[in-house]
Amino acid sequence: MPGYKRTERSVAELYRDDPERADALVWGRRDTLKGAGLAAMGVALGSAIPFARHLPSGMLPAALAQGTAPQFLQMEGKARLILQGERPLNAETPEALLDDDVTPADKFFIRNNGSVPEPAGDPRAWKITVDGEVNTPLELTLGDLEARFPLVTARLQMECGGNGRAGFSPQAAGNQWGNGAISNAEWTGVRLRDVLRAAGLKEGAKFTGHHGADTHLSAQGPAISRGMRIDKAMEEDTLIAIRMNGQPIPQMHGAPARLLVPGWPGSLSQKWFTRIELKATPHTGRGMGGTSYRMPVRPIVPGSRNNGADFADMESMPVRSVLTSHAHGARLPAGTRALDIRGQAWAGDLSVRAVDVSVDFGQSWQAMAVAAPPNRHAWQRWSGRVAFPSDGYFEIWYRATDSNGRMQPHAAANWNPQGYGANPISRAAVLVG
Amino acid sequence: MLAVGALLTATVALAQDPDLARRQAEAAAEIAARAEEETVLAEGEGRSETFAYCTACHNTALIRRSAFTRDRWDDLMDWMVEKHGMNPIDGEFRTTIVDYLAQHYGPRARGPRGGNPFLD
């Protein structure tokens, strides 16, 4: 069957490059998919497409929409994550590995901006500095932190600012994450606001600047140094974390201490955390300004050039959902007519009000049950049952709605050069029979 | 049940292994240091220059996954200088590299109607 395989791959490539031309060339049609063309597509996929008449022109079935085969991370203590790059080392958690309510260390995605530092010899002697617009600059060891401030524990979602980037067309710069640069571990630490109050905030303390021990890829200076408005620093859930899931924080994830700024771009949750500055004006470290972690206020033409000067910093992350019970590409036994499915959903600083699912390309939607979060900033479990009218090729489309009523859109909105904020409805292909 | 128990024990044992941090850091360094051959990049004029100049900080995965227009590749040269301390490249050398990138790592996906009417 080598001929058959070759055809399938070239169809996928054609669709990736130019969907409309592919429709015309491959299926011999210029308008909507129908008749013989569809039958041919069904053959390429190895099944019938029951809801074919609702498949919009130029829309490739999710099963064909994959790019080149992904590579996987192999590292002791880490699951089979999708390798996004070796230097810097970045790896994404496949959605089906995000089924745990509390993300275990091995399934935690990896985002590095620079080089992973050497582990600290004596974690308890690790020092954190608080300076800038404060009355009393502090230098605290982790031992001091634990002795002086109350420890709190919470499940907190932490997500890369670029999560979902692969949804943008044309392609945006950066790791081509699907939805898997998300985590919801149980973090233990001290509240950042308790530490800042101990230092005494001056009137001028309006912004923060964060520093860590990782070095830039060029070996010159810090890997990344971002900052935020003081309001977020003073929030109850913003922590200096020292334990993850009751254990010392793994080296990959910022040992022995990191910031945890839930619901905002993960780059604020400084790994290998060493210092926080309080500032009267926005921080200007690496990763601030321009198009970095910033999005257009007035939408720009997708693919156009822009220096980001009038963009705004990305703050609360947009609503998003993952399907964790069934992997994209799952095969189900012939005759399967009902399927119990589940996943997780979250919405930055907000919560998730609803998750809806469609198995007919968005023609009809069905509400899923959504559990309340165990604490603020934790993701929420959704679950429900869908029905298939026949055997064949189906796509499960899943869409979350946040507590303000905003839904995941049909296509990634507000294109920007570095690709932040893409949260389109996700599609997982399944084959019944 | 037994399998679940064994799995749990294994996870806890891993997390408590005091040496795991060091081994993970070493593994990360090893992955980052993996040598690449120039031939991982598409063949064409300018490949050697691009490979030599562009793998000082990161590997070619960042290039190979990209699909940008010439303008955006050109912008990226400035971004790498401004944000990441790359030595500026100008003149013929810049043209060689940007032409190479645009030709071999150009846009793949087109808009829903075969292109954006505001760009062409």
Image: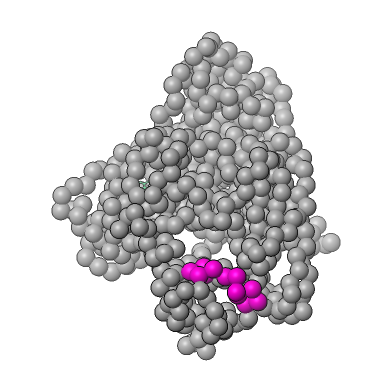
Q: Write the residue at 63% across / 30% down.
A: A238
Can residue A59 be seen in this snapshot? yes
- Does A274 appear in magenta? no
Horizontal side, residue A316 vs residue A286: left or right: right
Q: Is residue A75 above or below residue A242?
A: below
Question: Which of A213 and A211 lies nearest the eye of the viewer?
Answer: A211
Question: Which of A269 and A397 lies nearest the eye of the viewer?
Answer: A397
Q: Write the residue at 20% across / 57% down.
A: B96
Q: Write the residue at 77% across / 79% down.
A: A335
Image location (x, y in percent) of residue A280: 46, 18
Image location (x, y in percent) of residue A349: 63, 36
Image location (x, y in percent) of residue A244: 67, 40
State which quarter of the image contains the C terminus of chain A: bottom right
Image location (x, y in percent) of residue B38: 31, 64
| Residue at the limit of the structure toward the right, as seen here | B1
Q: Which residues are magenta?
A: A49-60
